[in-house]
Image: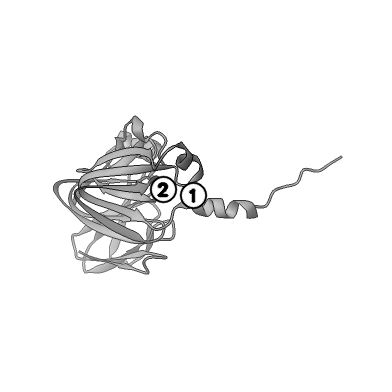
Amino acid sequence: MQAQEHFNPSFGMLEVKMQPGEKIFAESGAMVGKDPQITLETKARGGMLSSLKRKMLGGESFFVNTFSCAGEPGTLFLAPSISGSVCQHTLNNNEGIFIQSGSYLANDGNITIDTKWGGAKTFFSREGLFVLKATGAGTLFFNAYGGIHKVNLNNESYIVDTGYLVAWSDSLQYEVTKVGGLKSFFFSGEGLVCKMSGTGTVWIQTRKPESLAAFLHPFRRVQQKNKD
């Protein structure tokens, strides 16, 4: 299987060239197009309880699509629901990555996607109380709003705004805190940040949805009430 990203960082799309016998799992609604020899099967991956937990707690689709290639090689195109980049990362045995809700796109190989409790420290962060965790061996595909930037840490610390955090290695320690004092917290526009420490990789996005929502808010149409 060969995968290549197109149109990053604005409107990322994933091209997957598959050989007979290969399969890839993808988030519901991610398919853009495919060759006829690539079949589609939709099911609740991991059973009803596991799928329900990902849906209710992790913000992902209840159903997962499985694309399989049969007969001859074929090509599949996948894309996320938001505009931005698509990124791929190869997981080795016993390696895990945490992914923010809504950023999972697809995976091949023996990768398990589960919902994990992020701890009470995540209550006020953008990620919420639960995050997705990918473990196993294979290639993982996830997306961001805007471009994706990788920060590699070697027994170091790094601070990132919670709204820009996409994914991080499970080997890193994760702490939600203020960027400064109370004055900075309320008036700097930064709010809460994530302090990552240890050895691993952090993936951050170049835009955050909250900023777009705040920009568009003054232009929204407000329905006027009729006066008698």
Q: Quadrant of the C terminus?
A: top right
- The front one of 151 and 135 is 151
Name the mark on residue 210. Answer: 1
Residue pictured at 18% horizontal, 60% vertical: 21
Residue pictured at 40% horizontal, 54% vertical: 29
Q: Which residue type carries mark 1?
A: Glu
Residue pictured at 46% horizontal, 36% vertical: 182
Q: In this view, does 28 lie to the left or right of 116?
A: right
User: Residue 189, image x and y in percent?
Assistant: 48, 47
- The front one of 17 and 135 is 135
Neighbours of disc 2 within 10 Å: few (<14), some (14-19), many (20+): many
**Which of the two discs, 1 and 2, labels the residue nearer the N terminus?**
2
Q: Which residue lies furthest to the right in this view?
A: 228
Name the mark on residue 163. Answer: 2
Q: Is residue 66 left or right of residue 191?
A: left
Quarter residue 135 falls in? top left
Disc 1 vs disc 2: Cβ atoms closer than 8 Å?
yes
Residue 44 visible somewhere in the drawing: no
Q: Which residue type carries mark 2?
A: Gly
User: Residue 216, image x and y in percent?
Assistant: 58, 54
User: Residue 84, image x and y in percent?
Assistant: 40, 61
Q: In which quarter of the image is the N terminus?
A: bottom left
